[in-house]
Amino acid sequence: MASASGKSGLRFYGVIDADAGDPALLEQQSVQLVKYRDLAAVVAISPYVRSEPSDADLSDYVRVVDAFSAKGTIVPAPPGTIFRDEVVLARWLDVHYGKLHEAMAMIEQREDDRPPYDYVRMELGA
């Protein structure tokens, strides 16, 4: 997937249930999964550089997270989050495993129609 050379990393969109990774949706959104136990991180290859997300990056983020949210629960990552490689991402998933499950349960129980990442829409003026 991503090389450890520092040239490419993994743009992190959010975490879903590993069994919810629909291959057609992954292909349509040009993303892939990094699985850890029963969780999966939704990611895309991206340059591994520090930068503020542009409007295009935020629109891409909303598009991907909306698509997965329409199919099930996704715990959205902060927009613009990029991991160096799968090893670092898997370590992060391990450290936050319990909290990610709690977040998934809270999102599933929400009765609000707004997605849990609506703050991005406010930034975009959508």
Image (cartoon, rainbow, N blue to C red):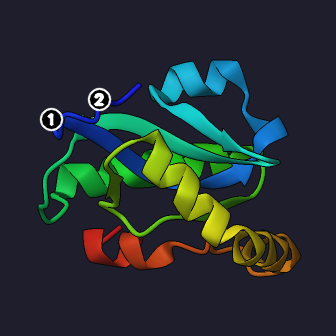
Q: Which mark is residue 93?
A: none
Figure check: 89 above or below 8: below
Q: Tell me if 77 is positioned left or right of 114 in this view.
A: left
Q: Tell me if 9 is positioned left or right of 78 in this view.
A: left
* Total numbered labels placed on residues in the image: 2
Q: Quadrant of the C terminus?
A: bottom left
Figure check: 6 above or below 56: above
Q: Depth check: 18 or 60 in front?
A: 18
Label 1 Cα neighbours within 10 Å, binned few <14 / some 14-19 / many ≥20:
few
Q: Give the secondary structure at mark 2.
A: loop
Figure check: 112 above or below 86: below
Image spot of residue 105 (x, y percent): 85, 73
Image spot of residue 96 (x, y percent): 64, 72
Q: Give the secondary structure at mark 1.
A: loop
Q: Residue at x 65, y 18 (%)?
A: 24
Q: Residue at x 38, y 71 (%)?
A: 120
Label 2 Cα neighbours within 10 Å, binned few <14 / some 14-19 / many ≥20:
some
Q: Residue at x 29, y 57 (%)?
A: 58
Image spot of residue 40 (x, y percent): 67, 45
Q: Tell me if 104 is positioned left or right of 28 in this view.
A: right
> Which residue carries the number 1 mark?
7
Amino acid at dot 2: Ser
Image spot of residue 61 (x, y percent): 39, 52
Separation of residues labelled 1 and 2 (CA atoms): 7 Å
Q: Quadrant of the N terminus?
A: top left
> Which residue carries the number 2 mark?
3
Q: Residue at x 44, y 53 (%)?
A: 88
Figure check: 27 above or below 114: above
Q: Depth check: 4 or 68 in front?
A: 4
Amino acid at dot 1: Lys
The answer to whether mark 1 and mark 2 are in CB contact below 8 A is yes
